[in-house]
Image (cartoon, rainbow, N blue to C red):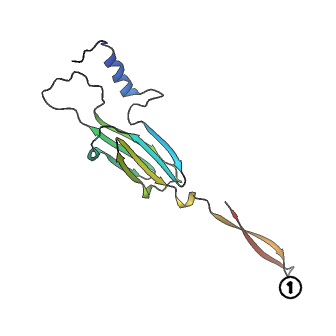
Amino acid sequence: MLMRTDPFRDLDRLTRQLLGTASQPAVMPMDAWQEGEQFVVEFDLPGMDPDSLDLDVDRNVVTVHAERPVRAGEAEMIAAERPRGVFSRQLFLGENLDTDNIEAGYDAGVLRLTIPLAERAKPRKIEISSAGNSNGSSKEVGHKQESKQIDA
């Protein structure tokens, strides 16, 4: 049987869960990085029922909701260290991401979002025009428009 030895440990654990620390946020720790032309975000949500996960996008704000219900029944809890209840986290995304085409998957306790870069954020060619000499039939001083492309 498990024995409790520190009466303040539960209070410390509860405080860390509610307020978090600099190295460990209160709920839903995440990693985010860019892979080529997509942005990837992973949230740790171990033990969550996939049906309890909810993902909403409103403009450039992604909101993740998850729920781990309180264990019901007549059993007396001896140790209850896993956070329970409803959890929520919001991400504010930049304009350079295509929030209309977000893909999400949940596997092994990790919720993974893949967000492609918006077309306007991808590298593209920009045409540059310049004036050059011309032997045209114009009576004005002849200048011909020449153009070339450079990478942006």
Q: Position of residue 65 (x, y in %)?
A: 33, 43
Please state the horizontal and vertical placement of residue 72, each as a whole percent of the image. Answer: 16, 32
**Place of residue 50 in the rendered image (x, y in percent of width and height, measured from the top left):** 29, 46
Q: Which residue position is annotated with label 1?
A: 139
Q: Position of residue 107 (x, y in %)?
A: 35, 46
**Lateral position of residue 50 relative to residue 16, left or right:** left
Residue at image x 45%, y 45%?
41
Residue at the front extreme of this rendering: 1
Crowding near pointer 1: few (<14 within 10 Å), some, many (20+)?
A: few
Q: Amino acid at mark 1?
A: Lys
Q: Residue at x 25, y 22 (%)?
A: 79
Determine the secondary structure under disc 1. Answer: loop
**In the orientation shown, which residue stands out farthest toward the bottom?**
137
Q: Is residue 79 above or below residue 36?
A: above
87 left or right, relative to 76: right
**Quadrant of the rendering where the C terminus is positioned:** bottom right
Point 47% across, 40% down: residue:
31
Q: Nearer the viewer, residue 87 or 77?
A: 77
Locate residue 6 relative to residue 19 in the image: left or right: left
Quick one: 80 or 130, which is closer to the camera? Answer: 80
Front residue of 1 and 70: 1
* Res. 82 image quadrant: top left
Would you place residue 78 above or below residue 123 in this image? above
